[in-house]
Amino acid sequence: MIKIHSGAEIEGMRRAGKLAAELLCMIAPHVKPGVTTDELDRLIDEWTEARHARSAPMNYNGFPRSCCTSPNEVVCHGIPGPYVLKDGDIVNIDVTPVLPRKDGWHGDTSATFYVGDPSPQAQHVVEVARECLELGLAAAGKPGARVGDIGHAIQVYAEAQGCSVVRAYCGHGIGKTFHSEPSVPHVGRPGTGPKLKRGMCFTIEPMINLGDWRCHELDDGWTAVTSDGSLSAQFEHTIVVGKRGVEVLTARDRVLVNSEDKPWAKLGPLACFTD
Ligand code: MF3
Ligand code: CO
Ligand code: CO
């Protein structure tokens, strides 16, 4: 059963989504060479706690931190730790504040950041992933859209760009629970899957690999890495289906920037708006 949210419930989702968007903007300038992923996690946790919210990842099925940090060949669910970000890395930061803290609404959003100067390969996979989210949002916004239309739009574009789409992890229904129906695959066939209806809330979060789509989990039980060691990038938004089109609940009101002096930052994902 896919939950249909009422007007008052969507108001709660708007507040949580806005907080998630602001949290990602807060962390952006801290994503620099020399910082550890643990330090980023600590900043995210403190900022969230100071706003009467909590971090959904903490203790979620035993996850030990407040966000996911996924560098380079890590596809998703990377655990913040002593890893020091270095020039040329890419890193996805995935945040999910819950507002209010108790029995609250979830806002789930992520972006892949360049650390210092990116290689052309890194720029390619990050740009393709960013565009894939845009295309997924556009497909969801078409009248009469079905879940399969979203994955189809993403898959066609990613593969035409010489990249591949991860199959093992999908977007998901969201609300007072972190993960619920529907599952939103980032590959698919048009006209298949559940029809989108007003009041449904879910995420779109394509994971795009520079090489093969296969991935596997490390022994920590969380970290997913590409099986061929190729770079992987991801962007995520939480949306609600409206009367016409979709509303991006985690849309940012400013540009995500971590190095204003870099010309590529203006063109790349750090300067992106998906709203
Ligand atoms: N935020 C992730 C998602 O987009 C889920 C992370 S679950 C965790 O669905 F436990 F790893 F935090
Ligand atoms: Co998600
Ligand atoms: Co997420």
Image: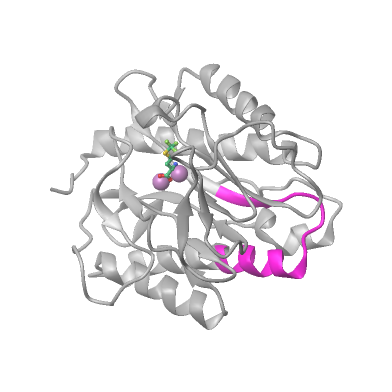
- Residue range (magenta): 111-129
**Residue 155 x/y as whole percent:** 42, 74
Relative horizontal placement of residue 10, taking residue 215 as reference (left or right): left
Q: How many marks?
A: 0
Q: In this rendering, is residue 172 above or below 226?
A: above
Q: In this rendering, is residue 27 above or below 4?
A: above
Res. 108 image quadrant: top left
Of 70 and 188, the residue lying toward us? 70
Give the residue at x 58% y 50%: 111
**Residue 142 x/y as whole percent:** 32, 70
Of 19 and 184, the residue lying toward us? 184
Relative horizontal placement of residue 145, taking residue 41 as reference (left or right): left
**Residue 57 x/y as whole percent:** 44, 31
Q: How is the image coloured?
A: one colour
Farthest bottom residue in view:
160
Of 259 and 112, the residue lying toward us? 112
Relative horizontal placement of residue 137, taking residue 70 as reference (left or right): left
Is 17 inside the magenta-drawn segment? no
Give the residue at x 63% y 40%: 25
**Residue 51 x/y as whole percent:** 52, 20
Is 122 inside the magenta-drawn segment? yes
Of 74 and 147, the residue lying toward us? 74
* Quarter of the rendered structure image containing ligand 1: top left
Q: Is residue 275 visible in this depiction of the protein? A: no
Relative horizontal placement of residue 132, taking residue 84 as reference (left or right): left
Q: In this rendering, is residue 144 above or below 42?
A: below
Q: In this rendering, is residue 105 above or below 260?
A: above
Q: Is residue 71 visible in this depiction of the protein? A: yes
Res. 42 image quadrant: top right
Give the residue at x 22% y 54%: 198
